[in-house]
Amino acid sequence: MYMPLLMMGALALGTYWLVRNTPTFSAPEAVKEVMHEVDYFMQDFTIKTFDEDGKLKSEIAGTEARHFADTDILEIDQARIHSINVNKQLTTATANRAYSNGDGSEVQLTGNARVVREASRDAQGKEAPRLEFRGEFLHAFLNEERVQSHLPVVLIRGADQFTGNVFTYNNLDQVAVLTGRVRGVLMPNSANRPLAPVSKPR
């Protein structure tokens, strides 16, 4: 007589135990949208990067910097950047403000932008004169040793000076291209020195 009741009770207890011990799966959390806001900042700072041999590759300094997580861009006030290439040529960049990507290989300079590559000699003893670029905007690709701008730029090579409305320079090829209203001043003592190619005025 009591057997059906006992079986029903055992079944009910078993069901209760299964309900208590069955793992529950929480709903997936909604992916938070990354906002364009500062996630950290630095003041009076210096950031140094080194190559795989431990040699200094670049150095970035400024009065204040703000990092934006969504773009991985470092915004720097009163930027001072030093870069040393594989031939140990030193390039220095300064500007009122700079925008650097995560690894420092690409920098946009705005406001009194200036990039200087110091004079040097290659392995064969050939001298490379000092180069300087000035403008309100310069876009530097440090690993590729390129500088470009869509705004007017002054190019100073040794004692010679050129200006143009649009500018690109490739240090690996030693080629500078100035377009738009191009003007140049060549000093007499530089007449026998080879010059980087410059495009004709348009």
Image: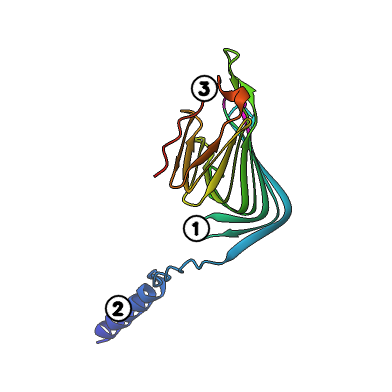
Where is mark 3, residue-wise? 194
Of the pair 149 and 74, the residue shown nearer to us: 149
Residue type indicated by callout 2? Leu
Is there CB contact under 8 Å for labels 2 and 3?
no
Q: Nearer the viewer, mark 1 or mark 3?
A: 3
Label 2 vs label 3, nearer the camera: 3
Residue annotated with mark 1: 71
Q: Amino acid at mark 3?
A: Pro
- Most common SS among magenta residues: loop
Whether residue 87 appears in magenta in the rendering, the answer is yes
Kindly identify the amino acid type of the residue bearing the numbered disc 1: Thr
Q: Relative to the observer, which residue lies in front, 108 or 42?
A: 108
Q: In what element is the residue under mark 3?
A: loop
On screen, 60 above or below 6? above
SS class of the residue under badge 2? Answer: helix
* Residue 74 image position (x, y, % from top left): 59, 54
Extreme residue in the top direction = 124
Q: Position of residue 51 (x, y in %)?
A: 59, 32
Disc 2 designates what residue? 11
| Residue 200 percent location from the top left of the image | 41, 38
Is residue 103 shown to the viewer in this render?
no
Rendered-image quadrant of the C terminus? top left
- Under tag 1, what secondary structure? loop
Left or right: residue 98 compared with residue 169 = right
Decide which of tag 1 and tag 3 comes sooner along the chain: 1
Give the Cα separation between the discs numbered 1 and 2: 59 Å
